[in-house]
Image: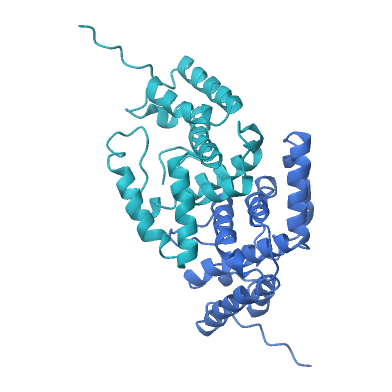
Chain colours: A blue, B cyan
Amino acid sequence: MRASPLAAADRRENDAEHSWHLALMVMLLAEYADEPIDVGRAMRMVVIHDLVEIYAGDSPVFDPAAVVGQQEREEAAADRLFTLLPAGQAAEIRALWDEFEAGRTPEARFCKAMDRLQPMLLNWLNQGGTWQMPGATESTVRAREAGVVAASTTLGEVTNALVEHGLRNGWIRPDPAEETG
Amino acid sequence: MRASPLAAADRRENDAEHSWHLALMVMLLAEYADEPIDVGRAMRMVVIHDLVEIYAGDSPVFDPAAVVGQQEREEAAADRLFTLLPAGQAAEIRALWDEFEAGRTPEARFCKAMDRLQPMLLNWLNQGGTWQMPGATESTVRAREAGVVAASTTLGEVTNALVEHGLRNGWIRPDPAEETG
C-alpha cells in the first residue's frame, strides 16, 4: 500500500494500481517529453519500478522517518527479488531498475516525472492527500515538482498550476517562517 | 472489480491490478511466444485492454448471464471513452483496442493468451477461484486454455498442467454427463 489516496475510491492506492497508472500516463503523455523517448522501454521501466517494495515496503516521501535507509532497503530488495529470475532476465530487469533509480537517461527522467506527477494529481483530486502529511510544505512539494519540470516543460507548467491551486486553497501548507536572529 | 480472487489478499482483483500484472507477464514471458512480437506494442495493448470496463463493467467469462450483450456494451463504452482523447490519440488507442479484441495479430494473440493465463494462475493459487462459478466446468475452462495454446506452445503446456492439477484436486468440475437417448 502507498500513502496516496485514490481518486475514485475511499482508500489508499497500491503499487499495482500506481504502476498501471504510470504506464498509461507514459503512453498518453510521451509526446510532452522534452527529449525523444522510447515509449516501450519507458513502459517496461514504470511497470517494474516499484517491485522492490514487495520486500522494502513503501517509503512515503513526506515522511522523514520512512525515507531513512530507503536506498539500502531497496537495493537489498532488488538483490533478493530480481535474482529469482533466470540470470539473463535478472540482469536485464536489474539494469532497467538501476537506470530508473539513477534518472540519467531520457526514459528514466520521463518515468520519474510521471512518478512525481501522478501523486500530485491524486492529491489535487483529493484536495490534500499526502500534502497533508507533517513533512509536506510548499518547499518539499516544489522539490517533487522539479522532477516533472526536469523532463517536460509542458507537464511542469501543469504541475505548477496544480501546486499554485493547492496553495491558494490551503491543501498545501506554506513553509514555516524562518526564525530571525 | 473483476471476479478473480487475488493471490496475496483476501479480496477480488481490480482492472488496474489485472492490467499491470498482464504488462509484467508480457515483459517476462514474451520469449515464449510462438511468433515474434513487438513487446512495447503488446504492453500498450494490455495496459488499455480493459479500460472499456469503466463504463461496460466486468463480464465474468463463467457467468453466462453477464456475457450477454458484452460486445455491444464494450463497443459503446469504447465510443464514449476513447473519444475523450484528442482525435489522433483517440484513433490510435481505439485501433489498438480493436486489434486486441479481434485477436488476429501476433501481439493480440499473445496479449489474449496472457489474459487467459493470468486468471488461471490466480484460480490455481486460490485452489478454485472463478473455477467454482456455476458456468465453469472442464470444457469451458479448456476453451480458455485454447487461447493460451494459440499463442505459445510452452505456456499452453504450463496451462494444461494447471488445469490437469485443478481437475485432479476437484478445483475444476468435470462436464455434466450427456443425457443418453
- The image position of residue A109, as x and y in percent, is 71, 64
Q: Residue at x 55, y 77 (%)?
A: A162
Q: Is residue A69 visible?
A: no
Q: Quadrant of residue A29?
A: bottom right
Give the number of marks: 0
- The image position of residue A59, as x and y in percent, is 67, 58
Q: Is residue A120 above or below residue A21?
A: below
- The image position of residue B72, as x and y in percent, is 30, 47
Quadrant placement of the C terminus of chain B: top left
The residue nearer to you, when weighing A99 against A64, is: A99
Q: Quadrant of residue A9?
A: bottom left
The residue nearer to you, when weighing B34 against A1, is: B34
Q: Residue furthest top?
A: B181
Q: Residue furthest left?
A: B181
Q: Residue at x 61, y 43 (%)?
A: B24
Q: Is residue B112 above or below residue A68?
A: above
The residue nearer to you, when weighing B146 against B171, is: B146
Q: Is residue A97 visible?
A: yes
Q: Residue at x 61, y 25 (%)?
A: B154
Q: Taking A173 as reference, is B131 left or right?
A: left
- The image position of residue B52, as x and y in percent, is 40, 52
